[in-house]
Amino acid sequence: MSTHTETERKYKVKATTQLPPLDGISGVAQVSDPTGTSLEAVYYDTADLRLLRHGATLRRRTGGADAGWHLKIPVEADTRTELREPLDGEGGPPESLRDLALGMSRGAALRPVARVATERVTRELLDRGGELLAEVTDDTVTATALTDPMRTREWRELEVELAEGAPPEVLDRAEKVLRRAGARRATSPSKVTRVLTPRPLTRVGASPAPTAGDVVLGYLADQVSALVRHDIGVRRDTEDAVHQMRVAVRRLRSALRVFGRVVDRGRTASLDDELRWLGRRLSPARDLEVQEQHLRASVAAMPEELVLGPVAARLTRYFSPEAAAARKDVDRTLRSRRYRELLDALDDLLADPPLTPRARRPADRELPRHVGRAYRKLARRMETLPDGPGRDVALHGLRKAAKRFRYAAECVEPAVGRKARRARKAAKAFTQSLGEHQDTVVARPLLRDLAVHAHQARENGFTFGMLHEQERRRGADAERELPRRWSELSRRGDLSQG
């Protein structure tokens, strides 16, 4: 399997629109002669278009230099990751791509849903040194839905795809020239959505004055999409995917809890329990990843004369089997029936949300009250922090409450604006200090165990003792930062005031 990251923009144009001189784009010194290609793609999806609902597409393309099977996954506004497998006769999608799509398909059959034929003319945009900046393609498209009822549409569109390593502003420069010629940004990154319309994840009103329900449901839909998108990264074992998936879980749980009087908490409590289960299943893999990266970086930063014995090898002997076991547990989780049922329950929540009467109230008036309540709960934890043996546990609980508040402020930011943004940023700084402290709480007993194992193996445990002391100091430094960080947060946290 190969991976390609594409950053591109699509534009709607009339059949009669003349392509403007592309050497008029700032930074473009040369435009290649046009080359023509005939492409055909058959798109595969479930009967109810689950992949397309999450912004992904799976196609079998013939013609052109990149013929093969392509699974495209959204990353951000103009960027998608394309996973490719070679053509293998006339069969259905390869097992590797079907497996990666399980979080979207939930095991439902993937069948042909559309055929798209494209007559493409490509021009390359080059800089003064002859380096490729971007490709501009002029596509004449015929798309046919293979679902019931069958329908066909024909149109013309332009695409500008950024070359690898080219500056992103090339896209903005090209857009200025194309817009002057009459081109307009396409509303979808995929051609197939011209003939297929999936059911949206949720129905959020488009009013300029959104309701509380609109804002909370929009946030929940964003986090469900993020969860499914990072599901693919976790299955591929890509860097940071487990972390990002766990963050999506936390954001979902925070929204369900803080806004439980908008989306009825009584009817989402079981869903919250299942999200907690998923978060716990992901945690060991992520925690091991964080600890290993941090300890290896700490060892690398030590003066060479203080690294005594096979320290790196000892870290490998500990982390490799632990990480492999945690990885297997994550894989089992993502293939489990319980996980699929959780994803189905999230879809059901968005499709038919249990909204309360408060959900109809104006978002900018209603939601700050709920965020303010979350802040006051956080403040009570801060005010009652104990000293002594229970302090580390209490600080960890404080961190969880601070994250819940942070994500709640993030949720209401579109409706509340700068006030919520400042509160979110202050909460982020506060939780970072608490996170530093918690990392040291986890690291210190681990380092003690590593020192003991080194001693039992007749190795020198000195370096692990040094690392233990470093972690103790790091934890103390992080805790000393808390009053200052809390002072900033306490000035901005209660959104229900003022």
Image (tube, rainbow, N blue to C red):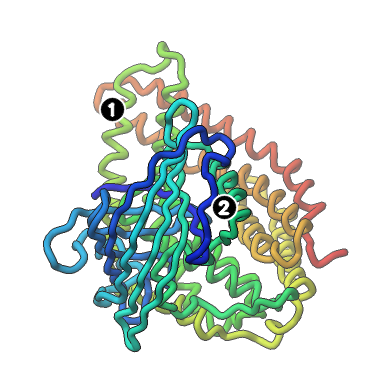
At x 62%, y 35%, the residue is 476
Tell me the crowding category of disc 1: few under 14, some 14 to 19, or many 20 or more residues within 10 angstroms, Cα based: few
Q: Which mark is residue 413?
A: none
The local secondary structure at tag 2 comes to: helix
Which amino acid type is shown beneath numbered disc 1?
A: Ala
Tell me the quarter of the picture where residue 112 sits.
bottom left
Residue 6 on image: x %, y %? 41, 49
Residue at the limit of the structure toward the left, as seen here: 89
Q: Tell me: 359 left or right of 144.
A: right
Tell me the crowding category of disc 2: few under 14, some 14 to 19, or many 20 or more residues within 10 angstroms, Cα based: many
Q: Which residue is mark 2?
A: 178
At x 29%, y 45%, the residue is 322
Tell me the quarter of the picture where residue 330 sits.
bottom left
Q: Is residue 418 above or below residue 496?
A: above
Residue 145 on image: x %, y %? 34, 79
Q: Tell me: 353 left or right of 359.
A: left
Along the viewing direction, whichever of 27 and 254 lies nearer the viewer: 27
Q: Is residue 129 above or below residue 214?
A: above
Q: Is residue 443 visible?
A: no
Q: Which residue is mark 1?
A: 313
Measure the alpha-carbon separation of dots 2 and 1: 57 Å
Q: Is residue 215 visible?
A: yes
Along the viewing direction, whichever of 339 and 415 lies nearer the viewer: 415
Residue 14 on image: x %, y %? 52, 66
Sequence-wise, which precedes: disc 2 or disc 1? 2
Residue at the limit of the structure toward the top, as seen here: 305
At x 31%, y 74%, the residue is 114
At x 67%, y 47%, the residue is 430
Residue 337 on image: x %, y %? 29, 74
Which amino acid type is shown beneath numbered disc 2?
A: Leu
Q: Is residue 269 above or below residue 90?
A: below
